[in-house]
């Protein structure tokens, strides 16, 4: 076994005494307090418009009667089908890219990434439904005319979801900033002692294929041992075994736990034990 050289804040294990699940924040040794920059806002605004354009093209694939509104014939499908496939491909790249951007910039907080992606997709759906409600507004077909109120309600509903997601995103960014500031403050002037992991139960929850745990950590406060429960997020290949060394920062009731870079790596070799049962992102 060798001292740890891996970037644990990327793949884990990451610990938290204040947050759990998708809200756990990873703070690199040289991290600064993250902030919402103009690039994030621009990605959301332009991404929503692009998502709306792509969904406008793709939407008739789920509602075929919409294709009859412009009076298209089979010849029109020759160019519409590859256009729709291209738009779907853009969506497949756009949404995960937005998620990854926010997750990476805000302490690998999955909750922030999911809120950003939800806001983008909801805004795109609202734009697409608004465009098609305008397109079909002059149709004389009774079936198409009956779709108009549904599209109007769908536009309003998707817009409301986008607005709520944007608000939750702002609250999530604020929460991440507070947590990172707390951790950096503890790193700077709190007491730091070496400790060890004493219990690692089997995971019952996976978030984006990352198993989640509530582990026991032991350290010494003077001559007295203390054991605290800590939430841990990691990858299946990097689940530490009991006895693994950690660092504990504490000041009063505030604590923070992270991997001890001087401690030998002790990861469980039974990766299948910690892989999500579905083989995917888990739940």
Image (cartoon, rainbow, N blue to C red):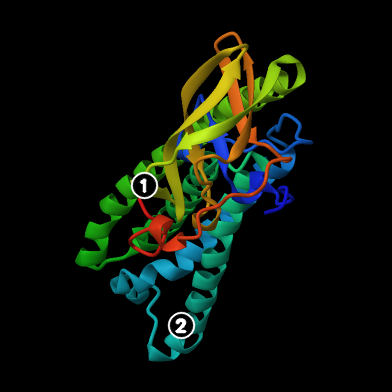
- Residue 69 left/right relative to 250: left
**Which secondary structure lies at badge 1?**
loop
Asked whether residue 173 is in view, the answer is no
Residue 250 placement: quadrant: top right
Pick out the residue farthest to the top: 252
The quarter of the image holding the N terminus is: bottom right
Neighbor class of circle 2 (other Cα within 10 Å; few <14, some 14-19, many 20+) is some
Name the disc covering residue 64, or none.
none
- Residue sitting at x 45%, y 57%: 128
Distance of mark 2 from mark 1, alpha carbons? Answer: 48 Å
Which is more toward the observer, 203 or 113?
203
Q: Mark 2, mark 1: which one is toward the viewer?
A: 1
Asked whether residue 35 is in view, the answer is yes
Residue 258 percent location from the top left of the image: 63, 34
Neighbor class of circle 1 (other Cα within 10 Å; few <14, some 14-19, many 20+) is few
**Which secondary structure lies at badge 2?**
helix
Which of the marked residues, 2 or 1, is nearer the chain's N terminus?
A: 2
Residue 73 placement: quadrant: bottom left
User: Relative to 35, is 223 above or below?
Assistant: above
Residue 105 percent location from the top left of the image: 67, 42
Pick out the residue farthest to the front: 223
Name the disc covering residue 81, or none.
2
- Residue sitting at x 55%, y 35%: 15
- Residue sitting at x 48%, y 34%: 198
- Residue sitting at x 54%, y 39%: 243
How many marks the image carries: the answer is: 2
Residue 224 percent location from the top left of the image: 55, 12
Residue 259 percent location from the top left of the image: 64, 38
Which is more toward the observer, 50 or 131?
50
Mark 1 — residue?
A: 202
Which is more toward the observer, 142 or 272?
272
């Amino acid at each position: 076994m060798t001292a740890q050289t891996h970037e644990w804040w990327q793949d884990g294990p990451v610990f938290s005494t204040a947050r759990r699940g998708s809200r756990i924040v990873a703070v690199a040794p040289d991290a600064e307090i993250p902030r919402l920059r103009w690039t994030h806002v621009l990605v959301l605004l332009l991404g929503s418009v692009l998502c709306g354009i792509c969904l406008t093209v793709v939407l008739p694939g789920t509602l075929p009667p919409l294709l009859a509104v412009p009076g298209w014939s089979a010849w029109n499908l020759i160019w519409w089908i590859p256009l729709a496939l291209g738009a779907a491909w853009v969506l497949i790249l756009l949404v995960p890219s937005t998620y990854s951007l926010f997750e990476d910039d805000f302490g690998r907080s999955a909750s922030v990434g999911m809120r950003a992606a939800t806001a983008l997709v909801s805004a795109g759906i609202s734009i697409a439904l608004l465009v098609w409600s305008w397109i079909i507004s002059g149709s004389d077909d009774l079936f198409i005319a009956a779709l108009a109120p549904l599209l109007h309600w769908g536009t309003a509903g998707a817009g409301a979801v986008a607005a709520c997601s944007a608000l939750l995103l702002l609250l999530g960014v604020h929460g991440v900033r507070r947590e990172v500031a707390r951790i950096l403050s503890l790193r700077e002037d709190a007491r730091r002692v070496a400790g060890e992991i004493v219990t690692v139960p089997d995971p019952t929850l996976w978030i984006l294929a990352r198993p989640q745990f509530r582990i026991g950590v032991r350290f010494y406060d003077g001559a007295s041992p203390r054991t605290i429960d800590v939430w841990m997020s990691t990858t299946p290949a990097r689940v530490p075994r009991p006895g693994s060394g950690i660092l504990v920062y504490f000041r009063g009731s505030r604590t923070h736990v992270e991997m001890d870079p001087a401690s030998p790596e002790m990861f469980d070799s039974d990766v299948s034990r910690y892989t999500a049962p579905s083989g995917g992102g888990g739940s």
